[in-house]
Amino acid sequence: MARTQTASIYDAITNQIITAFEAGTSEFSLPWHRSTSPLTRPINAATRKAYRGVNVLALWACAEAQDFGHGLWATYRQWQSLGAQVRKGEKAAPIVFYKVLDRQEDENAEDREDGSRIFARGSHVFNVEQVEGYALPEIATGESFDPIPSAEAFVAATGANIRIHGQSAHYTPSADRITMPERELFFATDTGSAEQNWYATLLHELTHWTGAEHRLARTFGKRFGDDAYAMEELVAELGSAFLCADLGLSSSPRPDHASYLACWLKVLKADNRAIFTAASAAAKAAEFLREKGREFSSTSATS
């Protein structure tokens, strides 16, 4: 595909996504079966309640650092109450919870409007992958998965370390590894088949993979500060949209790409050029991955 032709396609996709933003987007949902809902919020295994506030960020960070594929957490005693045992040597993740106090003498407590006081206390939780004796709930599977040869060849050519595990799709920088749920967990949606949804998700993670220090060394800290994470998500989803078009997985921007990107509208509203900055970085990532494919083809032809 000629470079100018590629650029025009990417421009068209970017502009159509912006149009989708302006028209309003539907709520984004992940296209695979899961035993916890929503997957992106850590859940307490004992209470089945989602963690909130800073605990979400803390558990996300811990899950990414240790490459956990499930979002279930609980304290040591809670796991015991569920008939499970934390494995010896496992490291807990710190969280904070708040207790409402009736008495006023605790100077470390915080006043509330209703006259009561709350006191912050620390606790520690373990992920389901750190325990033994707990059976994850059975989850439904989608229809049989029929691999798409062109997409399979493209992914193989990248040389990325891809692990099929758990119910989370993510890239772990410390391990330089992509984790994807089982293919059979994906299902067809209004925007694509189970296969298209699998590859679109994997292409999102592959775009994250290109940003590693020893690849494209992609950072947004100086300009975007606290919104750097949002910018990286914009790049990853635009990269997925571009690559889906390259591979013929979709002939036009899928509505779910716009729905996902709408989650990061804050950064777009703060900087009206952010989408174009992200699109430029996504195009570089897509070109990097295509180049990997050309290198793979050349090596295969001469071996």
Image (cartoon, helix red, strand yellow):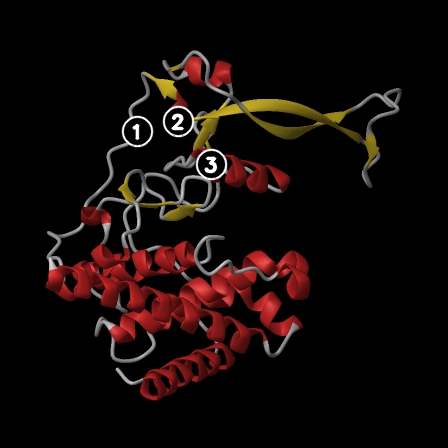
Which residue is at a point 20% across and 59% down the rendered structure image?
194
Identify the element where label 2 is drawn. helix
Q: Quadrant of the N terminus?
A: bottom left
Quadrant of the image occupied by residue 101:
top right
Q: Nearer the viewer, mark 2 or mark 3?
A: 3
Q: Which is more toward the observer, 192 or 15?
A: 15
Which x, y percent locates residue 250?
A: 25, 74
Please determine whether, in this image, residue 92 is positioned above or below residue 162: above
The label shown at residue 128 is 2
Report which residue position mark 3 lands on: 63
Contact between labelled residues 2 and 1, with CB atoms less than 8 Å apart: yes
Which residue is at a point 42% across and 71% down the rendered structure image?
284
Q: Is residue 163 left or right of residue 60?
A: left
Q: Is residue 256 visible?
A: no
Marks 1 and 2, the one that precedes in the sequence: 2
Q: Nearer the viewer, mark 1 or mark 3?
A: 3
Which x, y percent locates residue 132?
A: 34, 17
Q: Amino acid at mark 2?
A: Val
Please determine whether, in this image, residue 158 is positioned above or below residue 70: below
Marks 1 and 3, the one that precedes in the sequence: 3
Q: CA distance from mark 1 to mark 3?
A: 17 Å
